[in-house]
Image (cartoon, coloured by chain):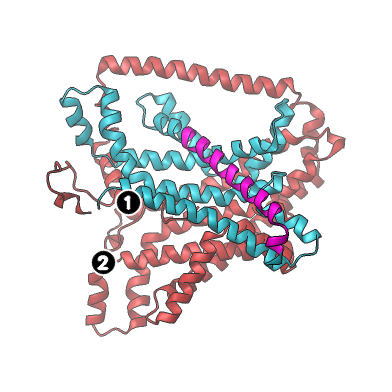
């Protein structure tokens, strides 16, 4: 308990770092994933190919390798950004591939007849998309998006090794100050549990509120 | 599953089936891309789509060209930067790194399959205490970031990098696999279990002869997809100074004699890494396609290969 109370500011900084990383990377992943999902379901062949390549490559890339390439590689092209931004980029791009697949399978669960019915009522593409297809897809993608974002929060631990302030990285200064390692890690674990449980609680509420009745 | 019972909703053209199957048969039977988003395009729309396609292809090609130009402009293709890969010593270093990665993967895969089996037995046990204990273990290790576990084992228990990496991966992937096994056993049709009991089989016999073979067959694609996650996560060993593939790359990349050949190293390493994972993923995918057509998996229902969206909290 001493470890937490005496170093509360250190823990708080790490916790906020992880939280920021998670939130920004989630936003990037959701936006990018949506764009890529739109590419993957579009009737235009080259866009579909782009989406497929994006998803296949990023899903099979180890996240450490991606961090390695982004954090240490992009500066070679003269692109120097704060480490945190690099971490958000790497995490967001990596997770966007998973989000894209979730959204695509969500759109594919909408029965074809729904779209056909909408069009036979004279709805335009925008109306069909916004009024018929996306609302139904949204209902079925809530739980998988939740678990993808939880995975993102857990993956953000890797950023600590690439000089970003986040929760797991706090073990190092504490260890040097001579605190008990086990308790240090217990509080780190609690921090991660708070974040993951908060996300899962949020998505439970969303599911209750909007989820499809099955 | 109860969509047909909800009052007033229009009956969908295909019966609401298991998600993976519905998608599979729809594309397989029709052979054409049909979504709720748009009708099959006519000749005019197809021409328009082709125009869009050419435009985007040109834009993508331009982007790619710009990247290649950037690579040249920043001098990534100079002879000094690529010279190290010609040396046998450095090739050996890379191969040793690759070997260490595969070694960690092999250990982690075997051990996590074993741990998964044990934990799944625990979760399916008839004894309440065992069940609760196994549930706690599984839930805890699934909720923790795998890196936290690896660091904990490495720093607090002061073990060597390889055992720390393997132990961390085993705990995480074992817990996930336990859930996969359990889902598989529970997804076997109820009649199979009932029939086996009616024939006078004992609890263990029902499990080993009837339920587990069907469950494993149905879940094999998912299991392999989870092993892809384990293979990807072996790269976390890099962060605890395990001398694996990425570590070897880092050694070469930070060599001043070769003008810090960082980009060349990434260009050599990532295709190999991604290729290995892709091979395994494709194997899982191919297996899933085969399973769907296999009459033996009918009682359990083959699951599409996707570890990402299987369960809450799973990567």
Which residue is under mark 1?
A208
Q: Residue at x 72, y 56 (%)?
A: B240
Q: Which chain is red?
A: B
Indicate whether residue B78 is drawn in magenta: no
Total marks placed? 2
Q: Position of residue A86 (x, y in %)?
A: 65, 36
Q: Which mark is residue B265?
A: none
Q: Is residue B311 above or below residue B153?
A: above
Residue A147 locus on image (x, y percent): 45, 51
Q: What secondary structure is marked by label 2?
A: loop
Seen at 52% across and 45% down, the residue is B278
Q: Please report contact status of discs 1 and 2: CB closer than 8 Å, yes or no.
A: no
Which element is circle 1 on?
helix
In the rendered view, does B255 fall on the left or right side of A89?
right
Q: Residue furthest front?
A: A5
* A22 magenta-colored: yes
Q: Residue at x 80, y 60 (%)?
A: A177
| Cα separation between marks 1 and 2 | 29 Å
How crowded is the residue under tag 1: few (<14 C-alpha within 10 Å), some, or many (20+)? Answer: few
Task: Locate the N terminus of chain A by quadrant.
Answer: bottom right
């Amino acid at each position: 308990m001493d470890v937490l109370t005496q170093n509360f500011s250190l823990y708080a900084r790490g916790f906020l770092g992880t939280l920021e990383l998670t939130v920004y990377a989630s936003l990037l992943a959701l936006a990018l994933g949506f764009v890529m999902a739109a590419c993957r379901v579009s009737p235009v062949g080259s866009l579909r190919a782009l989406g497929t390549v994006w998803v296949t490559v990023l899903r099979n890339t180890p996240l450490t390798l991606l961090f390695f390439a982004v954090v240490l590689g992009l500066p070679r092209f003269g692109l120097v950004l704060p480490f945190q931004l690099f971490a958000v980029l790497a995490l967001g791009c990596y997770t966007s591939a998973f989000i894209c697949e979730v959204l695509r399978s969500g759109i594919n669960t909408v029965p074809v007849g729904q779209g056909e019915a909408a069009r036979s009522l004279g709805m335009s593409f925008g109306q069909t998309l916004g009024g018929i297809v996306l609302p139904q897809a949204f209902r079925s993608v809530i739980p998988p998006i939740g678990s993808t974002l939880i995975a993102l929060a857990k993956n953000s631990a890797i950023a600590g090794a690439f000089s970003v302030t986040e929760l797991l990285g706090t073990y190092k200064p504490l260890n040097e100050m001579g605190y008990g390692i086990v308790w240090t890690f217990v509080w780190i674990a609690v921090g991660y549990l708070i974040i993951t449980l908060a996300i899962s609680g949020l998505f439970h509420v969303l599911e209750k509120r909007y989820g499809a009745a099955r | 599953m109860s969509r047909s019972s909800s009052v007033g909703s229009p009956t969908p053209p295909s019966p609401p089936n298991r998600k993976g199957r519905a998608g599979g048969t729809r594309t397989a039977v029709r052979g054409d891309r049909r979504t709720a988003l748009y009708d099959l395009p006519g000749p005019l729309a197809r021409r328009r789509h082709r125009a869009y396609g050419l435009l985007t292809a040109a834009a993508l090609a331009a982007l790619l060209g710009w990247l290649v130009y950037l690579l040249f402009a920043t001098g990534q293709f100079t002879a000094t930067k690529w010279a190290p890969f010609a040396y046998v010593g450095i090739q050996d270093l890379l191969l040793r790194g690759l070997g260490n990665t595969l070694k960690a993967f092999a250990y982690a895969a075997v051990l996590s399959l074993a741990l998964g089996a044990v934990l799944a037995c625990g979760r399916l046990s008839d004894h309440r205490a065992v069940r609760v204990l196994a549930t706690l273990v599984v839930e805890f290790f699934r909720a923790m970031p795998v890196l936290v576990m690896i660091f904990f084992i490495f720093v607090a228990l002061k073990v060597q990098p390889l055992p720390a990496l393997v132990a961390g991966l085993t705990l995480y992937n074992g817990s996930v696999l336990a859930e996969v096994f359990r889902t598989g056993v529970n997804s076997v049709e109820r009649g199979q279990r009932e029939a086996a009991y009616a024939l006078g089989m004992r609890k263990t016999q029902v499990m080993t002869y009837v339920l587990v073979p069907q469950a494993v067959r149905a879940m094999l694609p998912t299991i392999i997809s989870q092993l892809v996650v384990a293979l990807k996560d072996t790269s976390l060993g890099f962060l605890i100074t395990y001398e694996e593939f990425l570590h070897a790359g880092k050694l070469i990349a930070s060599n001043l004699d070769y003008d810090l050949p960082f980009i060349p190293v990434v260009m050599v390493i990532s295709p190999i890494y991604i290729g290995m994972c892709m091979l395994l993923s494709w194997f899982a995918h191919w297996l899933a396609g085969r399973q769907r057509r296999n009459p033996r998996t009918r009682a359990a229902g083959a699951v599409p290969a996707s570890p990402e969206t299987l369960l809450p909290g799973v990567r």
